[in-house]
Image (cartoon, rainbow, N blue to C red):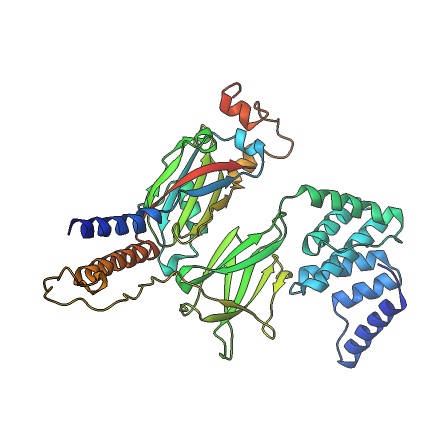
Amino acid sequence: MKRTAPGLAAVCFLALASVAAGQSPDAFTRAEQAYQEPDYQATLANAEEAVRAGNQSRQRLVRLYELIGLSAAALGDAERARDAYLRMLLIEPSQSVGDDVAPRLRAPYDEARGRRASLRGELGVDVGAVRDGRALRLAIGDPAQMAHEVVIGVRAPGEPAFTEIRRPTADEVVAPLPDPLASGERVEHWVRLVDVHGNHLVEIGSPHDPEVLQIRTAAAVIAPIPGPTPPAEPSRAEPSRPIWTSPWLWIAAGVVVVGGAIGTALALDATTERDARFSITF
Amino acid sequence: MRWIGGSLATALCAAVAGCAPDALAIELDFPSQETFVRSDMASVIAIELSAERLGDCPELTMQAALQTLDERPVAGTGDLPICDFRDGAASLSNLDGGEKAFVVVVRNSAGQALLTGCTVRDPLADAQGLRIVLTTTEDYRRLFPPGAPPPDCASADEKCAGTCR
C-alpha cells in the first residue's frame, strides 16, 4: 500500500519481464501497476479479476486482497474493503496496512480486525496420520468458510512424483493413502487449502520442499519371556535346595510374565471396548 | 499351586483392568448458544469405516440428516433431547477399535436437521477425546435467516431448566 521505490521497482520488473516474455501483464501485475499510478478503479478491477482467475499463491492472494481493500476504501466502498481486509487477515493474520495509510483507507481495516477477532478459530490445516498408516487426517480450520477444497500431494521418500488427492473441505478430512504405510515409514506431503477459484489459502510444504510425516502405529508388542525353560517333568524338590532352583518358581514366573504379556497385547491390540460420554461447547 | 493360579489371575486382571480405557470424551461444538437453544433433539451414531471409506464423512452426514442411511451403525445414542448431551445423560456404549465415523445430526421439534457434524476416529487409539464441530444446514439458514427474531431462550441454561421454549 505504500508506493515506495522498491515497490515501483518490483512492478517495473514484473511488467518488463512480461514484455520480455512476449506476454501482456497478468491481472495481478496490472493491479500493482494501477495502484502505483494510482488508479483505484483499475486496481480494484484488476485485483478482483486476478482473484477470479484463480491459482494465485498464498502470498499473492494476500496482496490482492490488500489491493482490493485499499482501492475499495479509496473509492468509498467500505463494505467491500472490510470484506477484502477480513479475507486478507484470515489468510495472513500478521498482515497490516501500515500506520501511514490515510484514516479513510484504514478504517475498514480496523473494522475487519474487529470482525476477525470475533470469529472463532484460525484458517489452517493440521496434518496427522490415522492409525495403521492408511490415510492422512487433516483438521481444517476455516472460520469464515472461505475454503472449497483441500489438495494433498503424497509420495514415499525417493518416489519421483506425488500422488495428488483432492477432497471437498470439511472440519476434518481423511485422505486414504495410495499405499498404506507401515509403522516407522515416512510420507512426504504437501497440502493446499484452496478457495472456489483455486487460490491458495493455506500452503504447507511444496512439491520442491515437502513436509515429512512419520507413521506411528499402535502395534501389539509381545514381551519376551525371560528365565530358563522349566523342565517338562518337575522333579521332587529337596528341602535343602535354594528356592531359585525350584522349577515351580520358574513356572510361576513364566505364567506371570505370559499373563502380563497377553494382557498388554490385548490392551494394545485394541480388542477392548470403550464407552463415550458427551458434552457441549459453544 | 493355588498361589500360581492366583498370580495368573492377578496378572491378567491387572493387565486388562488396569489398562481399561476411560470413557471417550466427545465434545459437540455448536457454532453459538443461539443454535443450541433453537435445537431440540440430537443423535450420534458411530459407523465402522474400512480403509476405502475413510473420506465418507460428507456422504454419511447427508444420509443421516435425510434419514436415508442404509447401513447399521455399530453404536448410537438414539434421538435424545439436546439437553441430555449437555448434562452428561447421553452416551455411546461398547465402542471397539478401528476407525469409525461419528456422525451427529441435531434437529428441531419438527424433525428438520438444523446442524450436522462428522469426524473420524479410532476410539481406542486416541487417548484424548474428540471434538465434533457442528455446522448449520440449509434448513437452519432458511428457517433463521440473518435478522430472524432471537429465540425465546436466552441461554442453554434457561433452555435446559425448562423455563423457556
Snapshot quadrant of residue B142? top right
Relative to the observer, which residue lies in front, A85 or A184? A184
Q: Is residue A75 visible?
A: no
Q: Is residue B114 left or right of residue A25?
A: left
Q: Is residue A93 visible?
A: yes
Relative to the observer, which residue lies in front, B150 or A141? A141
> Residue at 39% across / 57% down in the picture?
B53
The residue furthest front is A240
How far across and how far down the image is residue B90, in percent?
40, 34
Relative to the observer, which residue lies in front, A84 or A184? A184
How far across and how far down the image is residue A157, in percent?
50, 76
Q: Count of labels shown? A: 0
Snapshot quadrant of residue B104? top left
How far across and how far down the image is residue A155, in percent?
49, 73
Q: Is residue A213 left or right of residue B66?
A: right
The residue furthest top is B163
> Residue at 59% across / 25% down in the picture?
B154
Relative to the observer, which residue lies in front, A265 or A52? A265
How far across and how far down the image is residue A250, in percent?
21, 62
> Residue at 58% across / 57% down in the picture?
A125
Q: Is residue A120 left or right of residue A222?
A: right
> Residue at 68% across / 59% down in the picture?
A52
